[in-house]
Image (tube, rainbow, N blue to C red):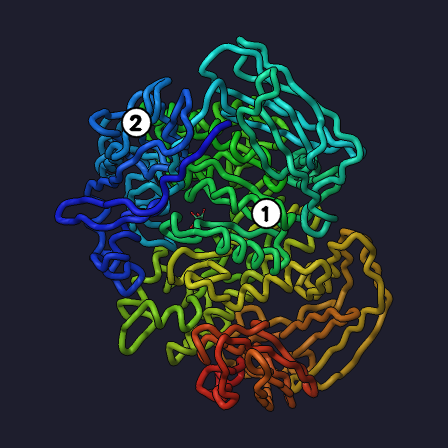
Amino acid sequence: MTFSQDLAGSWRLRGTGVDIAATVPGCVHTDLLADGRIPDPFLDDNEHAVAWVGRQDWTYERDVSWDGPSQERVDLVFEGLDTAARISLGDTVIGETRNMHRTHRFDVTSILAGRSGPPAPTGGRALKVHFTSAYTEAERVRDIVGPRPNAYPEPFPFIRKMACGFGWDWGPTLVTAGIWRPVRLEGWSTARIATVRPLCTYDGDAGTLDLTAGVERTRDSALRAQVLLDGRELAVLDLPASETSVRGEIKVPGVTPWNPIGHGEPALYMLTVMLTAVDGTVLDRWQQLTGFRTVHIDRSADDAGTRFVFHVNGEPVLVKGVNWIPDDIFPSRMTRERYELRLRQAAGAGVNLIRVWGGGIYEDRAFYEVCDELGLMVWQDFLFACACYPEEEPLRSEVLAEARDNVTRLSPHPSLVTWNGNNENLWLRGAHGWAGDPGGDLSWGAGYYLEDLPAIVAELDPTRPYQAGSPWSGSWEHEPNDPAHQTFHSWEVWNRQDYRHYRDSAPRFVAEFGWQAPPAWRTLRDAVSDEPMLPDSPGVLHHQKAEDGNGKLARGLAPHFPAPATTEAWHYLTQLNQVRAVRTGIEHWRSYWPHTGGTIVWQLNDLWPVTSWAAIDGAGRFKPLYFALREMYADRALTIAPRDGGLVVAVLNDHPSAWTGELRLEHRDINGAVLSSTTSPVIAEARSVALVQASATCPVAAGTQPAAPVRAANRDAALVVATLGEARAIWFAEDSGYADAGLTVTAESVPGGLDVRLHAAGPARDVLLQADRIHPDAVVDRGFLTLLPGESTVLHVRAPIELDPGSIKDPWVLTDLSTVLNP
Ligand code: BMA
């Protein structure tokens, strides 16, 4: 039986002038940090102070001996080496690697144990993993293949390493090295299971398991693969002496399908493959949870262009998605607990799909296992982003091997619903390409996205739809980012326009769009020691990586609010604008379902403290956007928005049963007093949208002047309120000029925190409680909220320590829009 010996734990790390204890799995930066050799790179501009780390070579070292039972073969297995590594054992160089995204296996039998003899004498051999600086390696490759256009000034397209480690428009440049995933010795005899590729589908009645198992052998002898589901034998597949792989297509009647969130249970089954000799001796065992479902993306043509609608088990699924970036700039720090926390938070916001973006990594097994369990669909990019990628050697074979490796590794996960060729690289080369032309006959990645990767997916995983890129219109006939055809990235609005322009079009699927805001106050304060801390003080600017990011934030505020007078007001208003912008987009596009197949917000998370598009900041704190997503992505949501010159209520029903009731519409004046109200019956069928006219004209003042008093014409229709059951939507004709909120606030100590009772005498708009201003670990259960006159609510603040109820009165802990605008 295969025997595994973990080599995690303590190693030495050596570099010029450095010889310290190291932790494996890990990376150079975290070892140097643990030893006090570098300052915290997340603080102020320490990123620059530690830049030297990425320019150096590093060696990890420890002694190893084979401690397991005597075996015919002993392999050294690295699940991940980051990146350009030379591995030696004793005096022998056993291999060189240059791809962070692959696993590597080396036969070390003759060095460690002797092919058939007893284990090597104690004392072991020195195992050394020498890492060449990723810059040195990337620059070497760039010299071979020639430079290529790139949205960023760093050489990430020339090395198969997490691109965003080289810096992004939300991330620092922290180029690390190390043994970032587990490493072990694996001893085996006769044969071992090399790969298992289960493709599970569901036809509405029964499941099908199309299973391919690959073996590696030390000798030619007949073998058997026994396949079990939840412990029940499904099949026994024979492997004749000459074969190294076996395939079985097995019908599995009576299974419960795996369903995405909102569409039923995500049923999982334990799949086991036992490799045995013909005499029944067990040689190896493979085990993983899997699920049965069939995924299809409807990309058929219609009058408006080309659709992009996910179907799971035959049912159309409205995608309520978020984009995922690596949750830590040093991904070796990720734990199962942290994946679990973050993904549960995504699901908790009503998200049903998470897109693993191409500038990051193929995530850890734990990521996909949690998604499987939650019913959270995964859209996986192949790892190419925002640049031209050379297709020549020495990169090409790495790219192909990495794709095969990961398509196989991730195949058991029912949550994984689609493979995508790249992020924005086809768009980049479209007629309006924004990163220039590689020139001449130089390759730029098209062969990967349009030929190699689809061929690999078709061969290894034909059950999952493949798209060449995001965005992609389906062919060169239309611009890659044509909103009428398939996937669209909506960035013009954030970059150049007011967020109201999200309403100008109804793309077929919005795979990226977003709006920036600073992180939680505490997160920013902990990362920046500027005194005073200003929106444009050096530390704050260092933690804003987007080109003209602060300028865009300011221009985004200008049509709605007067220029903020303090950093606190800037922080409040930019967070509010982020919520309003994303809300405008999602609510508008969702009202076009199924014409618009879904939205994937840029972005769920951050990997350090930064002003970015994220809903959860780099310290793991919720920005108010998080709570707003929960409302926008609720199964049932009500919205009011301008449409066709009037105001329209959209009854958004992503629920398996119809939503029926009396829709109440009120027009209210500037003080919130009801001027008129009507009720009418409404039906939004299951998984559909009903539109109801709220007003024939739209009482919105286009181009509202900052701080302008509400104009007379609007005074009588200042608010439109729609209510259906528990759901409510409010339309405010203008951004400012409303009456005093007249808030009464009382905080009461309860076990675990404070209950904060709010009562509003006037219209209390965009009340925000910032729990992190009470205590760094305090959390609250709501973001921005609005109360109409006479309404009350209770906010729950929870913290690991007892909180003083008086702290609710501290500056900026609890505020609302009218207080911010009229301090
Ligand atoms: C798109 C993404 C990311 C980027 C984001 C914000 O380009 O794919 O590369 O971070 O927009 O600019």
Type of the residue with mark 1: Cys
- Mark 1 or 2: the one toward you: 2
N-term-proximal mark, 1 vs 2: 2
Task: Tell which residue pokes out farthest to the left in this image.
Answer: 17
Q: Mark 2 points at which residue?
A: 120
| Label disc, if present, on residue 371 of the rendered structure | 1
Instruction: Please identify the quarter of the rendering in which residue 251 is found.
Output: top right
- Distance between mark 1 and mark 2 Cα atoms: 43 Å
Q: Which residue corresponds to the image point at 68% horizontal and 60% vertical from the top-left?
A: 634
- Element type where label 2 sits in the image: loop
Q: Is mark 1 within 8 Å of ligand 1?
A: no
In this rendering, position of residue 685 left or right of residue 37: right
Could you say where residue 328 lies in the image, as x and y percent from the top left?
40, 53
Q: Can residue 627 be seen in this view?
A: yes
The relative height of residue 33 versus residue 771 in the rendered view (above or below) is above
- Which residue is at the front of the view, 533 or 751? 751
Q: Is residue 430 visible?
A: no
The relative height of residue 563 versus residue 202 in the rendered view (above or below) is below
- Which residue is at the front of the view, 672 or 26? 26
Could you say where residue 187 lies in the image, as x and y percent from the top left?
42, 27
The relative height of residue 651 versus residue 529 in the rendered view (above or below) is above
Type of the residue with mark 2: Ala
Could you say where residue 37 lies in the image, as x and y percent from the top left?
20, 57
In this rendering, position of residue 748 left or right of residue 396: right
Could you say where residue 3 lies in the image, as x and y percent from the top left?
46, 31
Task: Tell which residue pokes out farthest to the right in this image.
Answer: 681
Q: Which residue corresponds to the image point at 45% horizontal and 61% vertical from the top-left?
A: 516
